Image (cartoon, grey):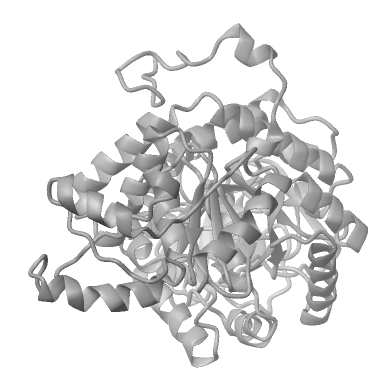
Amino acid sequence: MSISQSSDLPLLAGSRITIDTIKKPTRVGLRRTKVVCTLGPACWEVEQLETLIDAGMGIARFNFSHGDHDGHKACLDRLRQAAKNKDSHIAVMLDTKGPEIRSGFFAEGKKIDLVKGESIVLTTDYSFKGNSSKLACSYPALATSVIPGQSILVADGSLVLTVLSCDISFGEVTCRIENNASIGERKNMNLPGVIVDLPTLTEKDINDIVNFGIKNDVDFIAASFVRKGSDVTKIRSILAENGGEHIKIICKIENLEGLQNYDDILQKTDAIMVARGDLGMEIPPEKVFLAQKMMIREANLAGKPIITATQMLESMINNPRPTRAECSDVANAVYDGTDCVMLSGETANGPYFESAVNVMVRTCVEAEGSINFDGLHQAIRNSSKMRYSIGNSESIASSAVKTAIDINAKIILVLSETGATARAIAKFRPNMPVALVTASEGVARQCNGILKGCYSFVVHSLKDADAIIDEVNSEIVETGVAEDSVALVTASEGVARQCNGILKGCYSFVVHSLKDADAIIDEVNSEIVETGVAEEGDLFVIACGTLHGSG
């Protein structure tokens, strides 16, 4: 029996779902959750990329576990051409290969057959050519890292070994084979529960970040196997030293050490990825969903975007339709509070890449349709206040969301140079779209790609609010973000006399025009202090009204 997370009261889950909910058509234009698509041979031509953009891709993921810089650059050029053709702000994610432990090469053939119950020796001499009784391992500290009784998983867990003994002097570990298996060369190996002595950033990762990511102005670095907060500091230092300060860091949590240090990592990173593939090797698979819910909740409270990834629609690599369990997995991630969901092989290698995105988008929309966003806003605000002290920007953002809910606004319009205001507002989960207006193409891509419910519009300058609203208003309607949107601004001495004379606690200041917000603040700030309404250094809130004070 579950309790509803979409109600103001403690009710059984599903109270907002009726037969009409199930029967009504899916309105994909109302989607809030963003979709990350991994690019690969199946979808990397311009026309195919345009198809992905039309279907709903917000971030294009480049997996640097495969390919070289020339190949990735050619794909990036095609992506940017497709985005230009579609006039879309598609963000680019560089996903690092990260540290890895792999089995070695064989003396004969490309596969070996292993039999349950037999023993096998793992040697840290990686030059050794293996067979069914002895196999090389790329991790030099293997013999000092594991102890008898621990498990070693090979080839995504298709082979399970149990450690019997460790010979530190020879760098060898004797294991019992727990299942029959046939494996190939250089397969990945996982050591569940072991703190491995490997750097988070390898030389290859640093080269990829500096000589591809920064050079080609990517928007996100997804760092594999982040295990502690200092890893994030190291990545940020490399970015800053090479002119990549604007690139946002997404930390992939893939093992128990990363989970144990999650609070420290979350404080230092820009975003999180729940990387369930390796995580399911490092902790028991039946506990992965618990780790997912914990990480999403904490990221929601911290106001950090979070991506749920791995095997979400895995069967669609080969099939045109997903399993029902896969759709439920996507929907439950949305219920948990994820900002983004991710496709890997489904788009990179499968012939049904467009269908995979369509299914994911439609599932997200259906899940969002049964969430009580009004209650969700209050729950996030209350939980955030209990956990953290809400700062000025978050307090203002929360108030903006509450106001929009109270007056049933169709959209929240945000003017921002850095995207920080949009991120703060997105944290409080408004039930209407957030339209970010910015002069920065990079900020537009980042916010459009990863912030839940946020859509970006680029203008030449943020200095003239009236001109911006006129410019963006029709575009908001044309893109389907909102059906109608009107914003008017007025400056009136009559209004000043009326408000100053009759409204309790209201003091009026008249300016020549309301068009330049920065100039108004400079002009009024000293006058507020001189009249004694406030003291120097006090905080104040600016509320911009429209024609006849209509809000």
Apparent side of residue 438 relative to residue 287 in the rendered image (left or right): right
Apparent side of residue 182 relative to residue 30 in the rendered image (left or right): right
Q: In percent of the image, x 24 and y 49: which residue is there?
A: 498
Quarter-of-image position of residue 145: bottom left
Quarter-of-image position of residue 23: top right
Looking at the picture, tell me which residue is in the foreground, 474 or 362: 474
Image quadrant holding the N terminus, namely top left
Q: In percent of the image, x 29 and y 77: which residue is there?
A: 523
Q: How many marks?
A: 0
Q: Is residue 498 shown above or below 1?
A: below
Looking at the picture, tell me which residue is in the foreground, 333 or 287: 333
Coordinates of residue 228 in the picture (x, y in percent): 37, 67
The answer to whether residue 415 of the structure is visible from this angle is: yes
Apparent side of residue 333 relative to residue 83 in the rendered image (left or right): left
The answer to whether residue 162 of the structure is visible from this angle is: no
Apparent side of residue 73 relative to residue 371 in the rendered image (left or right): right
Q: Is residue 119 shown above or below 100?
A: above
Image quadrant holding the C terminus, namely top left
Coordinates of residue 122 in the picture (x, y in percent): 58, 64
Q: In percent of the image, x 85 and y 56: which residue is there?
A: 50
Residue furthest out toward the bottom? 241
